[in-house]
Image (spheres, rainbow, N blue to C red):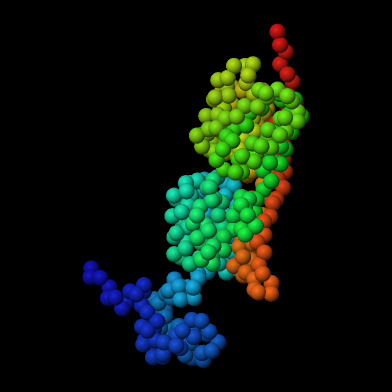
Amino acid sequence: MSPRPAEEDPLTASIRDVAGHAGVSVGTVSNVLNRPEAVSPATRERVQAAIAALGFVRNESARHLRAGRSRVIGLIVLDIANPFFTDLARGVEEVANAAGLAVILCNSDGQPAKEAAHLEVLTEQRVQGVLITPTPELSAEIDTLRTRGTPVVLVDRRANGPDQCALAVDDVLGGRLAADHLLEAGHERIAFIGGTGGLPQLRERYEGVVAAVRDHTADQDALTVLTPAGLTVAGGREAASRLLGLPAGRRPTAAICANDLLALGVLQEMVRQGVRVPEEFAIVGYDDIDYAAAAAVPLTSVRKPRHELGRRAAELLLDEAAGGDGEHPHVHQQLVFSPELVVRESSTVRHRRAATT
């Protein structure tokens, strides 16, 4: 079969082709596309018939480049496999779609190089703005983007200074809520699974746990910290296996996990090893994704307003894009949400200290 002539290819038909086919000027075609009310019904019908016959598709990219920006915003997240970020993205999309914008979703996998590459592509696409949950160190590309006039909003991350727009959750409070809950239930040894470095959000959760433990006990061995290879279900299974390998006298009776995926992995391994949850081991997760309530043993979790974070982030980005003027200079907003503890079966049994011999 011979290839179709270029002039019949719907992807190559130009506005000039449409004008020639309809017997009108290029300006008239442009008016039909952008200001149809300015064209008589008969002419408009003739142009629309030519568009349909040629399969013409307007080149939005070229139009946006001429205008200086597109009708698109970028959203860069740390791990799209984590339902926390998919829920957040839904909130972003709701606001963006209502404003006539599309969302390009990018996954950095927590890797600075991938994050930088995504930022470069979004810059080339002339996006109206970027929402980003950044890797541990804020990328220089973020500042570069902002100096070029593209607004950036940090999501689930505190800003380093007053010149940045950001939304965060009080994760120190979240860590404290989780630890207070377990300590008040009688647990004298707890584990924090997620590590003390890396993402600022994780460090804050750890700080909250440490503060609560110090308020409840002077025992230096009351807190065990584990850093699995990843913040995933597999990482949770790995951490649980390590906990069960500890001598009985040093083994924690409960764990606070840095996210719900870790908590689900801990639960899986405990069940596999025949450990009863919560009678023998209590588990608290973080984020309160939908899977937490649906687990075989419903998980207690620190709830973050995932959907609301996305919605407010998108609203702030549109506000940043609108900017200010000389009389009313723009003020970058920095919002901090409060988490809440949702108690379920994985931690509801009051722990009794084992009798010593």
The x and y percentages for residue 10 are 36, 74
Residue 277 visible in the picture: no
Of residue 346 and residue 182, the one placed in the foreground of this image is 182
Relative to 192, say whether 323 is above or below.
Answer: below
Q: Quadrant of residue 264?
A: top right
- Compared with residue 301, is residue 253 higher up or lower down, i.e. above or below? above
199 vs 348, left or right, is left
Residue placed most toward the observer, 221 or 131: 221
Query: Residue, x 71% and y 37% (percent of image)?
Result: 176
Q: Residue at x 71, y 34 (%)?
A: 211
Q: Residue furthest left?
A: 2
Task: Count numbered badges in the picture.
Answer: 0
Residue 191 position in % (x across, y down): 63, 28
**Quadrant of res 244:** top right
* Residue 226 appearing in the image: yes
Give the residue at x 62% y 59%. 163
Q: Position of residue 16 (x, y in %)?
A: 37, 84
Image quarter hosting the C terminus: top right
Q: Is residue 329 left or right of residue 66?
A: right
| Above/below status of 305 relative to 50 | above
Image quadrant assignment for residue 255 = top right
Q: Quadrant of the N terminus?
A: bottom left
The residue sitting at 23% across, 70% down in the picture is: 2
| Frontmost residue, 254 versus 6 | 254
Front one among 144 and 35:
144
Residue 326 location in percent, x, y? 65, 74
